[in-house]
Amino acid sequence: MAEVRAGRVADLAGGQRILLDVDGREVFVFERDGRFHAFQNVCPHMGGPVGEGILMGKVEAVLGEHRETVRERFSTTEIHIVCPWHGWEFDIESGECAALRKFKLRRYEAVQRGEDVYVVG
Ligand code: FES
């Protein structure tokens, strides 16, 4: 497997994304909470540019005494990237679609070496 340099760590500050070619596939890289993530920039629904999507916490129900939904909140531990074409959401840790787990983004390993970030393809 080859490593492809994505860019400098500083280039990913503030939620920036980097697009790069990894073995003929477009891959996007981003940082979240000090960790780097890389996925192929193709949504398994209809091929949308999922790397252009926003990041947001999973919407989860807060249950009451009788297990009824009292309210909803955004998770601070399960973060999703939302495909801009039709709104499918994918867990940034696993790449799995939140609603249909059989659909997944193709994940790549992203590693920091010094001041640079590399994607292993
Ligand atoms: S192409 Fe991504 S949700 Fe439809």
Image (cartoon, grey):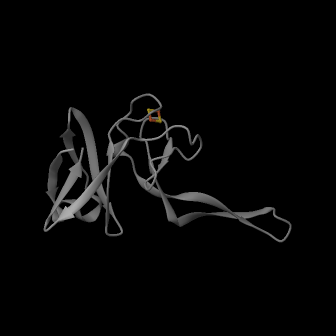
Identify the residue at image location x=36%, y=69%.
33
Which sits in the foreground, 86 or 116? 116
Quadrant placement of the N terminus: top left
Quadrant placement of the C terminus: top left
Which sits in the foreground, 52 or 18? 18
Image spot of residue 44 (x, y percent)? 45, 33
Say left or right for 77 vs 26. Answer: right
Which sits in the foreground, 37 or 61? 37
Quick one: which residue is furthest to the top in this view? 46
Count the marks: how many? 0
Identify the residue at image location x=24%, y=60%.
111
Image spot of residue 37 (x, y percent)? 33, 55
Quick one: which residue is furthest to the right in this view? 66
Q: Is residue 92 above or below residue 85?
A: below
Say left or right for 96 vs 24. Answer: right
Image spot of residue 13 (x, y percent)? 23, 64
Q: Is residue 117 above or below residue 4?
A: below
Say left or right for 92 vs 108. Answer: right
Which sits in the foreground, 114 or 49? 114
Image spot of residue 94 (x, y percent)? 46, 52
* Residue 11 in which image quadrant: bottom left
